Image (cartoon, rainbow, N blue to C red):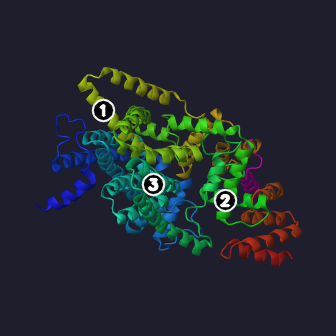
Amino acid sequence: MAFAPCGAFLNTIFLSGNENPYNVKATVFNQEKFYNSSRFIFYLFLAAFALRIGFFAVMRDYPLLYIQSLDEKYYVDLGKIIASGSLRGEQGAFFMDPMYGYFLGFIFFVFGDNLTIVRLIQILLDAFNVVLIFAIGRRVWDQWAGIVAAIIWAAYIVSFYYTLLMLKVTLAITGLLVFMLLLLVVIKNQRKTSWFLTGMGAGILNFISANFILMIPLTLVFYCFIERPKWRSFIINSAFVLAGAMTLLSINGIRNYFVAGHPVFLNTSSGLILYSSNNPGNTSGLFDVPAFAQSHPVSCQDDFLKEAERRTSRSLSPKEASIFWRNATFRVLKDNLQIIPVLILNKLKWTFANYEITMNQPYQFVANFAGTNKWPFPNYAFVLAFGLPGLAIGISRRKQVGWLLVPVLVILATLMIFYVCTRFRMPMVPFLVIGTGICLRIAFVWVKEGNWRKIILLGLVSSTIFLVSMSISPPSGDGYKEFVLAKAFYSQNHHDKAEAYAVNALKKYPDNLDLHILLGRIATKKGLINESIMYYQGAMKITPDNFTVNYDLAMIHMDSGKPELAIPYFEKCLTLNHHIQSMFHLARAYEACGNNRQAIKYYREFLESASPDDPGREYAKKRLAVIR
């Protein structure tokens, strides 16, 4: 009896909705009794959790799980800062969306910075997505469609992969599903306070991923066309939604104002991402930073900021730099109109392709390592082939299905505006999965009715979508995936394995700069200086203006007792980047060569620019006192 009130509440949220729209004979999956449905979904949740735990167990020795780079490192570092008690997070305005950093910070505060705990919690969240998908599918169509969609997600192998990464993908999917489920509940009860909470929910989504800001206008547009409220109700409810969203966004704006002096409501990375994704040097539809920037998020922001300041000849804040690059993108596109259709077609191609385009870690290596390449379905091509027709047919028969288009259109717009990769694409997959459930449910009814003409037409459409998606070849290889794996072995001091992977990859991709640098560093670690210089000289032929290549070469010569050979490389570094350590070592090199005048100059510049706690300050002061 104690279960009854709780069951009634859960039934309202998770099990209320459309029932038996075709008046077919009831089965165990569409009975009204709460305990039958909840028991099946609970078992499915356990199965989904077990599958993901099994995947984690298989992947436990995979080297890429034990290094964090690019965005993963940014979020882990932010989580550690927050867990240490600095609730404001990073020093300036948030460069990327902060919610995942606070999510990690809370886990680190409670359990310590144990990434296994984070992965287990993300596995739990992704397994719970089965319940959310079922609840949404049941509300917009029926219980049978919800069950089918939940089963598909329980076995969707790409979602397993993202639960193991320190990225916001799993949190974004769960947050989006929760928001859409609550939105469907709010639309049914029409309470003003509920609309305000809906706006606050949209505000929280924006902290998870800034592109979700599009959820707010699209939600209001679809509310107008799907529910057709009276204008007075529409205006009032819209005002409550906007008030709720601004309440949350203002918190971030106030925080950024007091920390950075600028009321930034979202983040400061959008401008550089927009430019990196849309320029004449990159029409691939994928992400590729320009030559003047490094790939690490913090370094990339600094590089874009310095380049914007160089081009404007004035000091800029991160917010102003983001605006500069946004406007620069618009100018580039305006001056090169011919690249716009190329960009759009390439982005549509990668959005449609079954190939999983990843950035931080290569999914194909993970799949091969885990043996998941032997688990072909359900893949993206499958849910696309049945999800799109399912949404189209569903909307033609029941307007509530149109709500599923809101997140799909938000993600599609994100991919078209910025770039295509799996982690950007993933949040729309659950809604395609629900569309697949609707499609298979409709097909089941058509089979029972003997409506073979519709079945054949649906089969042709779905087969065409599936085959086109599967037939799109992956992006041309550049050695990046091989480099990432070799670097993982290198970071764990498995230098022989790292060298073997990198050497084989370099034979296939001789123009890959990262492979040259990695092999140079491995050779340096082994004390093979001449071999190291050979690899760096190969990198120099590819990109002579690369900062890392010049700096590493300078340090090799410096550590080898040849400061005269290091000087030109250190000077080149300073033309590429106002690098403090380059000043310091350049001063040392000039002093070692007996050029005290230049040594004094660079020691002084170093002391003017270095932070008060820089360990090189004392050395520089002592040397100045000696050589003056």
CA separation, marks 3 and 2? 27 Å
Quadrant containing the C terminus is bottom right
Q: What stretch is highlighted in magenta?
A: 542-562
Judge depth for marks 1 and 3 and give the one in front.
3
Where is residue 413? Give x, y as percent: 54, 46
Compared to residue 548, the image places residue 627 above or below, namely below
Work out whether mark 3 precedes mark 2 in sequence or the reverse, and give the earlier one.
3
Foreground residue among 110 and 432: 432
- Crowd around label 1: few <14 · some 14–19 · many ≥20 (10 Å): some
Residue 442 — which label? Answer: 1
Mark 2 residue type: Ile
State if disc 3 and disc 1 touch (CB < 8 Å).
no
Compared to residue 417, the image places residue 25 above or below, namely above
Q: Can residue 556 be seen in this view?
A: yes
The count of marks equals 3
Which residue does the image show at 42% across and 33% down from the upper left? Answer: 373
**SS under mark 3:** helix
Residue 220 — which label? Answer: 3
For the stretch drawn in magenta, what is the main secondary structure?
helix
Where is residue 105? Give x, y as percent: 45, 66
Foreground residue among 377 and 72: 377
Which residue does the image show at 33% across and 24% down from the upper left? Answer: 455
Which residue does the image show at 71% across and 42% down from the upper left? Answer: 280
**SS under mark 2:** helix
Mark 1 residue type: Ile
Q: Can residue 167 be seen in this view?
A: no
- Crowd around label 2: few <14 · some 14–19 · many ≥20 (10 Å): some
Quadrant containing the N terminus is bottom left
Where is residue 180? Give x, y as percent: 38, 52
